[in-house]
Structures are given as C-alpha cells and as structure tokens.
Amino acid sequence: MTRLRAGVAGFSGYSGAELVGRLKAHPRLEPWLLEHRQDSDERPRPAGQPHPPQIPCTREAVRSEKLDVVFLATPAAVSIELTPWLLQAGVRVIDLSGAFRLRTVENYRRWYREEHSQPALLAEAAYGLPEYSRDSVRTARLVANPGCYPTAANLAIRPLLEAGVVDRACGVVCDAKSGVSGAGHAPARKTSFCEVTENFSAYSILDHRHVPEVLLTCGLEEREFSFTAQLLPVDRGILETIYLRTTGVESSDALMDVFRRRYASEPFLKLYPDGVPDLRAVARTNFCALGVKCDPATGRAVVVSAIDNLVKGAAGQAVQNMNLMFGFDETEGLL
Amino acid sequence: MTRLRAGVAGFSGYSGAELVGRLKAHPRLEPWLLEHRQDSDERPRPAGQPHPPQIPCTREAVRSEKLDVVFLATPAAVSIELTPWLLQAGVRVIDLSGAFRLRTVENYRRWYREEHSQPALLAEAAYGLPEYSRDSVRTARLVANPGCYPTAANLAIRPLLEAGVVDRACGVVCDAKSGVSGAGHAPARKTSFCEVTENFSAYSILDHRHVPEVLLTCGLEEREFSFTAQLLPVDRGILETIYLRTTGVESSDALMDVFRRRYASEPFLKLYPDGVPDLRAVARTNFCALGVKCDPATGRAVVVSAIDNLVKGAAGQAVQNMNLMFGFDETEGLL
Amino acid sequence: MTRLRAGVAGFSGYSGAELVGRLKAHPRLEPWLLEHRQDSDERPRPAGQPHPPQIPCTREAVRSEKLDVVFLATPAAVSIELTPWLLQAGVRVIDLSGAFRLRTVENYRRWYREEHSQPALLAEAAYGLPEYSRDSVRTARLVANPGCYPTAANLAIRPLLEAGVVDRACGVVCDAKSGVSGAGHAPARKTSFCEVTENFSAYSILDHRHVPEVLLTCGLEEREFSFTAQLLPVDRGILETIYLRTTGVESSDALMDVFRRRYASEPFLKLYPDGVPDLRAVARTNFCALGVKCDPATGRAVVVSAIDNLVKGAAGQAVQNMNLMFGFDETEGLL
Amino acid sequence: MTRLRAGVAGFSGYSGAELVGRLKAHPRLEPWLLEHRQDSDERPRPAGQPHPPQIPCTREAVRSEKLDVVFLATPAAVSIELTPWLLQAGVRVIDLSGAFRLRTVENYRRWYREEHSQPALLAEAAYGLPEYSRDSVRTARLVANPGCYPTAANLAIRPLLEAGVVDRACGVVCDAKSGVSGAGHAPARKTSFCEVTENFSAYSILDHRHVPEVLLTCGLEEREFSFTAQLLPVDRGILETIYLRTTGVESSDALMDVFRRRYASEPFLKLYPDGVPDLRAVARTNFCALGVKCDPATGRAVVVSAIDNLVKGAAGQAVQNMNLMFGFDETEGLL
C-alpha cells in the first residue's frame, strides 16, 4: 500500500505534537516534520526512538519530497503566509489556526482585528466540521479546521435549532471551560503552574474569537448567543454547559431523541441518555460526548458537551478531515 | 476583657476546622470543641501545639461550661437534633447546615426530600446573609448560615434585581463551580484524588438544594433561574458565572455602579471595575469579589462572583454573624 | 485465529480497569469480567458502548466458559482464596496482588504480618519480572506479578550490582514517589482530593511491604537498602531516585553502559543517555525509563527510574507475562 | 510607636510578593516598594485596595525617604549591584538571592560559575539562619538570607552531626522536592502548567547551587553529601527526605531527642514525635517541621524536613532576620 506523505508545520506545539503522534500511528500515512520556526524541546530524549524525517518548510523541499498534504499547526499569520504557495505546489492544506474559518474579510477584521491578505482563499476554504460539512471537505483543497470551543458548541446546539425546539428569544448561553493546553505552548505568566493551580478564571467574556464560528454554523445572531471562555486547572479537555429554553419538548429524553436521530450514524458522537459526561469521558479520544437535562414544567434545559481540545478540538478532527479528503475510512487512526 | 465561650460541633470537617482556626484567632472568643460524633484525624500531630478544650456535646457539659454560643458544622439531621436543647439551655446557635434556611416545612420537604421535625424553629431562624439581614441577625437566637453557592449568587444577583435592570423574562443563568472541600470531609469515590484531578463534572443540574435560597433571597420564580453546580479540581473556592439580559443600562460601568451604590459601606465586598476576579482573588478571605461585563448593543451581561467556600461560604460568614449577634465589630477576626 | 479467553477478577479497581482496557485492545484475547465482589461505578455511561461479558467468579462459570487464563486484580487475601481452585480447574493464573511474591511463609509473615495458607503455591509461583525471569514465566501455572515500586527499583539496581560497580558497604537508598492510583480504588481520607492536592507525604518509611521484593531480586541485605514510599499529587506514575556509591566506574556514561549492555535487546527499557526521565516520559506506556548521573571524583551516583504504576507496575507487566506464558510476541497489545 | 521604613526591591516575584504581604501585617514596619526593573502584573485589581508607596530604587529616593532597611528579592547579579550603595547610604540590607551566601569568591565561582565583584561584602555578610547565627545577624549590616533547600537541610542535619550520631563514612543523602514557586516568577516552558501537572522531575542532580550552603553550615565534605532537587506539581512547599546511618543511637525516639534538646527554645521548629510531617503541615507558616524514623537493628535512619519555600525558605526567614537586626521580638509578624 502506498502511503500518503503528510507534512506538519508547527509540530512542537501541543496540537502539533498530538498531530504527529496520531499521524505516526495512522496506517495510510508517512509523517514529515516541516521546520518553519524552530522550537527547542529541552527535555532529554531517550536513545533509539525514531522520529519522522525533518525538512525545511520551503516550496523546494515540499516539492522534492512530494508531500500530498500539509497540516498547519501554526499561528494564523503564519498559516496565511504558507497556504498560498503550498496550494500552488499542488499540496492540499488542513489549517488548524483561525486563519480561514470566517468566510469573509469583514468578519475576520471584526473578530481578529486584523486585515486578511488572502480573501479568495478565505472564501474558498471548507469549514471542516465533518458532521456538518462532510461533502465540501471531501473535495476541498483547503480545509479550515474548526476551533476547539466551537466544535463542542456547534455539535450540541445546531441539532436543537434545526429541530426547532429552542426558544431563540431567550437566547442560548454557553459557559465554556478549557484545559490549559488550549492556550498554546509559548510560556506565559497566565499559563504558568503557580498561576493556574488552585485557580479558575474567565477571559474574553462576550468577545472571544471563537464566537463567530458558532454564529455561522448555527445561524444564530450575536444577540442570541452569550459565551464565556474559562481556564480550568487541567492539562486538556473542554466542557461546555449550555443553557436554553425549549419549545415543544417535554422531557430530557425528548431532547436526547433529537441528538439520537441526528447523530445515529456518526462515528464520533457519544450520547449519555442517563446523565451527563464529565471531562474524562473523552480524554485522549476524538469523541464529542453529549448529555442533557430538561425541566418539563418550565422548559429550562441544560446541555453538557465535552471534547478533548487537542483531539476532536484540533489534531483528531484534522485527521478526520484528512481521511475524508483522501477517501480513507473516516475513523482510520482515530479509534 | 471577658471572652465569649463558643462551642463547635462538627469540628473535624473542613468547615469545622476552618471555624476552629478562625475562632482561635478571634480576640473576643474562647473556642471549645463539642464532641458529638467522633472523627479521627489520622495525621501525626506536632509536639506542644495547644488545642482548644474538648467536652461532650451534651446539655450538661454545655451548661456547666457556660457556653454562650454554639456553631453547628454538622449534617442537617444532626443540627435539627441539637438545636432545640441548645436554645433551651440559653445558648445562641449558628447553624452551618441546610436545616433552618428554607423558612417552611413545605419548602424543606420539596428540596431536601425529608420531613422537618422543628417547624417553629425553621420559621424563627434568621437567614444569616449579613449584607441583607443584618438587623434580624443581631437579635436572633438561631441563625441559619447560608449555603456557599447561594452566598455568591445572592450577592451578585439581588442588587441588580432591586435596581430593576434585569429582564426577568429571559431568566437568570448561574453556572457555578466549586472546589472539592465543598463536598465535605467524608471519603467518597467521587471526591477521591484520582477521580477529580484532570477532570471537571456537573451535578444536581437544575435540582440543587441550594437553589431555593436564591429564589427566597432574590424573589425569583423557579422558572426564572437556572443553576448548575460543578466540581473543580481545586481544594477551595467558588466562582459563579451569571448570565442575564439588562434593561435600561448601557455599559459594564453602569452595571458596576449598581454594585458600587449598594455595597459602598460593606466591609466584605471587593468590586473589580476593570475586569473580573479569579478564584484566587478571594482564597482564604471572607470577601465576595464581583466583576461584570455588559454588551451595550444587546444588553447581554455576565457577572462573575467569587468567594472562598469555606470562609464567606461557611466559617467566615458564621463568624461575621456571631460578631453581629454579640455586638462586636463585624470584621473582628476576619481581616 | 482462535483467541484466548482471559478472565479478570477485580476489574473495577484502577489496575483492573487498566487491564480490561489493554485486553480489549489485544488481538489474541477475548476478555471476560469475573464478578467476585461487586463494585458499583457511579459514573453515567454512554449509550452503545460494548462491554466484555460478565460472569460470576465461580468454578462452574470459569469451566463452562472455558477460560484459559485468569488475572487477579484483587486483594492478597482474595487471591489466596481464588488461586487454588482456578489452578485445579486448569486455568493459568496471573496474580497482581502481593499474595505470591515472597517465596516463603516466613518472609510473608514478616512483611505482611499474616499467615499464608498456601505455602506450596507460594513456593511454586514464578516472580514475573520478565527481564529477569522470562524462562520461568513461560512455563508457569501461577505468576506473581511484581509490585509497582520493586519493578522500578529492580530494573535500576540489579544490573549495577551484577556488574559489580556498587559499593555495598554504603548501602543503596531508594527514594520512591508514586501517583495516588497506586493506593487503590477504595475511598479513603488519605487519598481524597483535598488531602492530596498541594501536598506531599511519606509513608511506611523503612518498613514497606514492597521492600522484600527488592531484597530477593537484587540479593541485597535489609541493612543495605533504605526505602521510602511517598505520595505525589498526580494520578499515575512512579519515579524513584536511587543513590549509591560506585566502585570502578568513572563517569555517568560508564554507568549508562552497564544498562546499555544489560538491556540491549529488552523491548520495554528506555535509556536516557543525556539526562534523566521525568514521570511523563512513561505515562500510559509499559516502559521503564532509566537515566544516571555520576560524580567521577567521589563515586556518588544517582539513578532515576520511572514507570507508569498501572502499566509496567501492574496491568501492562501482567499482559507482558501473559504474552510469554502463551507464546505470543512479548509486546503484543503493549505498544 | 515609630515604625521602621523597609524597602522591597523585586516586589513582584513570588518571594517579593510574600515579603510585602508579611511586611504590611508587621506592626513595627512601614513597607515601601522599590521600583528597580518593572514587572507588570496583568491581573485585574479590585477598587480601593491600598498599596504601599512605590519609589524608584535609587540612592536619592532611598535617602530622601529615610529607609532603614532594604530587602532584595532580586537576582544575584542585581543584588551585587545594589548592595554597595545601599550600605553606603546607611541602609541595612537583607538579600534573598544567592549573592552573598558563600563567603569566598572561589566558592562563588565554583558553584555560580561567575566572578564576584564584591569580595569584601561577600566576606562580611552574615549567613542568616537564625537558629545557628543569631548573634552575627543581630549586628550585621548585610544579611545573606539562606536558600530554601539548605534551610530545610541544615535544620535537619546539623544537630545530628553536632551530636555525633552520624556515620559520616556512609554519607548523607538529601532527596529534596520543591513546589514550583521556588523556580521563580518569570514564565518558562519547564514551569508552565501543562509541563508540570501530572509530572515530577529531577534537576541539577549532584550539582545544585544550594549544595555549598549545606557543606558550609554542616561542615560536610562534598563527597559526604548527595543532593537532588526535584519539582513537585504543587505551588509551594519543600519536603526533604534525608538518609543517613546512625552511630550510638538505638531508636527513633533517641534521634528525636537530639532535636528536642537542640531546638527546645526555638520558636519556629515543629517536632513530630510520632511520625513525620507532610508538606501541608507547614504551608504558609514560618515553621520547619521535623520527623524521624530509625531502624535500631541496622542504624538506617530517615529524617523528614518540611518548610514553606516562600516563608521559612525566603520571605519569612528574611523577616525573622530583620526582627533580630532591629531588636524586635523574633516572631513579630510571623505567627
């Protein structure tokens, strides 16, 4: 069997390292490290552990090694710089940054407070949430891998909106908590151990860059959606507690039925009919776990959605998208 | 200066131990340990550390040692058993359990799913949230010390409701996170280290016993208030993220002004005009810290309220109530 | 391919759960749960997750389902009760408890402070540290799976003693630190989150039950070996810092050479030539990682040995032993 | 009562912040912040919290504000730069860095691998371990506040050496574990939450800069002392497990008697006659806690010594030294 050659730029960050690990275990792939901006890993390495080949992240190297696909686990600005020439070189690109998720330059400017230099690519990119965009991902040259928070939110909220059981006038509240690896690999005061342990904090209240991905995917207005990101003293995992008012459903089970119908054939959804998942239910897996509790008397409902931010929220979903793009089984390398 | 004699029943639990520590440091008090049901502390003790005197929790002992006040850091059932004879013995009682917080037997039955054998005391008890019940606490024989979650919630929500700036039709959402000490001292699977570390979980969704304390204090209907309790992998602290729609206020600062006016002379409120507090802002203190963020365009608002669950959420507030009951400075032993 | 039928008693403890997970992923095995003493798992379970079949842990059930091998992740007393009839029923047994590790009843009485009712089986059992007892494991009916602490200690100390580079007069010090899962699954005060987080403590100083496994495997006298077990605020992992004086070696690299020669063909040893491993180097793997630092001027040397207590220290090593017993590749299901 | 004016340089680091907190609570002191190199604290601050006055760290400011004493919680190089002119300005100096602890330039060069530009001050400085240098501290212009690791080690080892109960031929092993705050305030990969949580690691094995402070204080040769520093996943605290062979003592209690006699009148030693302390026994206190276990048959002994690295290991001991220098009660501000 010929194996695809897959490059990874930004391999030393947390998402990048997770990605390299997943790609090494994938039977259809041969991973290559693309050295763009060096990152030293100071940990001592054991003897005799093989590492993927490492080449410079240049057009020449990518061409001469005949890479088929490149994953970008780089900051948005770097992704915007690398993507055009990678596509020109005939390589398909899966970008894990926020660079290509928001469709229009106006939307990008509004949330990222920067100009976007590649509006055509922004418009072209497929938003890679497989449960809702499988077909466009299959044929895409460029896939924008979703943000971690929106992945958990969209998989929980969109089916309920589509089923027409949400009272939109009261809005949807998403209280999100993330492990520290979601803040990235660069040392910073706010992610240092002494600041995080025995602590918990909210940030980017009502103004997080991930909000527009939920608005776009769910078709919500900004006034209908309140979102708070919060930092948990754990390494990895996202748990979102989502509040809404229902219309026309009378029990927790009736709400769960909406998920059962929508996700019956989805390989990476785990439904909790008798409770709600905790963070650990999905640790180190590509699953999104969903549970729901509804008060029939008043229609108040709470949905709990949990993912591993580095897997379904980043590297795992990127592999899932790659599997779709190259016609592999969608779960290859992920179970 | 004559010092009051203050007994503590349930002194080996987390709230009880915090209470004993605070009472030992209080200049106007002499703490006594009331041995009700033994709890062994297996840790080795250093030589030469003085401990408060320990007596049995009986009418005779309480009388012969002339205790002035007794703190009950016991389960609700034990508090219901001890309170009548303590009051008869002329001792004032501050109860840290849920036994006397809900005013009526109907309400108690609804939320605690048990009958209450002391309806007269339930009706008599003063609810000890000093910021809202200072006068009734001063003269009370029996004070029901508030629950930890409701303390953080009521101090954040009630001023906004009283100021008339909340759109009640959309309801108030309180997403609450607590450290593990809030679950008490008895060993249990769900509070064991291996279950809690690197995890986060929700429990008692829409059905927590602390909910009625918010309904009673804020005057909210059950359908107007959604509450989720969640377990943080930290020892102590509560942070609540509260979502509501405002009416008639146009900025974060205007909302903060409501808190400024209401709490101008309160010794234990910390207001964050330029952000929101994190859990550590209040660790080991009797403060409640409040911050707010409001989107003027849509009226969506988020309030963050933080306390230490063992201090303002339990032992510290109990001491604050005791200070009021005996005419001491309200902050004595707490700064 | 016919698959072995492997039963697991004690499947709900931490080692047992790790074992079931490994066995489910093993291509040559079909796991069966043996219900001996029930343990409820209170966590909500997702829909549609297949579990291994569960049968009572009785002679009849074991015979009628034709189990080939049974893993005992049970307390020592339970293992002593189950092992005789399992062997009589023609089933091979791998015991993860301390029941059969110490060879003689005298030694068992000395360290476990109990009588042993099965001296013949105690004498018969093969001590399952594959790196030092591969041949006896292959043919054993009963394998005593080593303790977690001794596994890390023996793999670090024995090669140096065999190479004759240790000054035994000065003794060997082993300062051991373990994650909390090593203390087992039963709720207890000392393993509750609030006691462990932000804490670190030593226990069983100079008197731990695992000590004799090192004495037996390394041929050390009790006076030559000092051992302290300590509780780390982490879920899993053991790191041991081992101190000794060398004779006749002149550098860290010369000491590392002893390990290189001894472990050249071992699949589960990871050597760190340029530093020492940390706990995370072996998390969730069956590896033992070794690093060494030696001061040539004085002969003082420090060896760092790290394993995952639930894998190489328990379930993984049990699978490794099972692979040997049934002629599978030793690494099957473990890489 | 006139209060001393005490400046703090390096006030935004962990030791500096602990120091400012202690000084604010000290009845005989008025703290001043000396702005040397700015450090921004990004956390939102509550309204209305008073802070000490802040002045530039210059000769002019120090003179015009008439500071009596300055604490340097700065890197060694900065301390060497500031100390000469502070002393010339008539200010007494307590330096928390390693700049003035090692007595000779040769020793400083050997362990810090740098030249020392102030050999006269290095020779003059009093080593501020009050239990062993109370008299020289009282009259010193310049006090070198001890390192955190040596404080715990010296208080445990020196009494045993002085009592002549240690077999020095076998050497003394000190296995030390520290919370992350000991690594300082500057963001770094190795102290980031994701690297530290669920991990444990050794560093500077046999080669730590704190080693010579133990050699000098205890009178040990380098070949007699093995030391490993290790990073615990906790915020604060040091626990050292110390191994030695005894001569002429026959029980744990006989060893404890050595400590009892030596430390009978010491205000900050906590002895554990029936066990050993854990890290939490000393958290947020200025105590050093000691326990011991001895095997009478073989003379192997283990001493456990615990301190809070930011209090007795840094800021608290600095205040203790200041109390001595100015004739205050030694425990003022520390109990």
Image (cartoon, coloured by chain):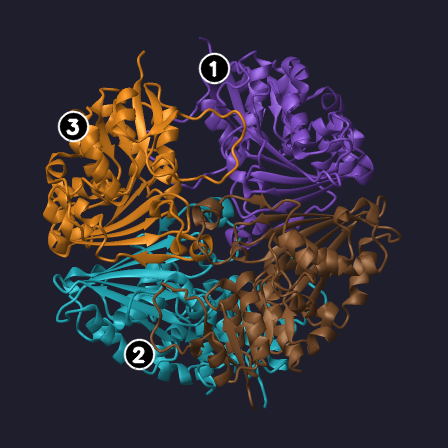
Chain colours: A brown, B purple, C cyan, D orange
**Who is closer to the viewer here, D49 or A301?**
D49
Please state which of residues A192 and A122 is positioned toward the viewer in this rendering.
A122
Mark carried by residue C322: none
What distance separates the C-alpha of mark 3 from that of mark 1?
Answer: 40 Å
Question: Label for residue D140?
Answer: 3
Q: Secondary structure at mark 2?
A: helix
Task: Give residue D264's position: percent from left, percent from top.
Answer: 22, 29
Q: Are labels 3 and 2 on one chain?
A: no
Helix, strand or loop for disc 1:
loop
Amino acid type, mark 2: Tyr
Q: Please report contact status of discs 2 and 1: CB closer than 8 Å, yes or no.
A: no
Contact, CB < 8 Å: mark 3 with mark 1?
A: no
Question: Which quarter of the rendered picture does the N terminus of chain A lie within?
Answer: bottom right
Asked whether the viewer can see residue A335, the reply is no
Q: What residue is shown with label 2?
A: C263
Q: Amino acid at mark 3?
A: Ala
For the C terminus of chain A, give its image quadrant: bottom right
Kindly identify the amino acid type of the residue bearing the numbered disc 1: Arg
- View extreme (right): residue: A248
Q: Quick check: do tags 2 and 1 share a chain?
A: no
**Secondary element at image label 3:** loop
Give the left or right position of residue B272, taking residue D54 as reference. right
Q: Report whether mark 3 lies on the same chain as mark 1.
A: no
**Residue for badge 1:** B28
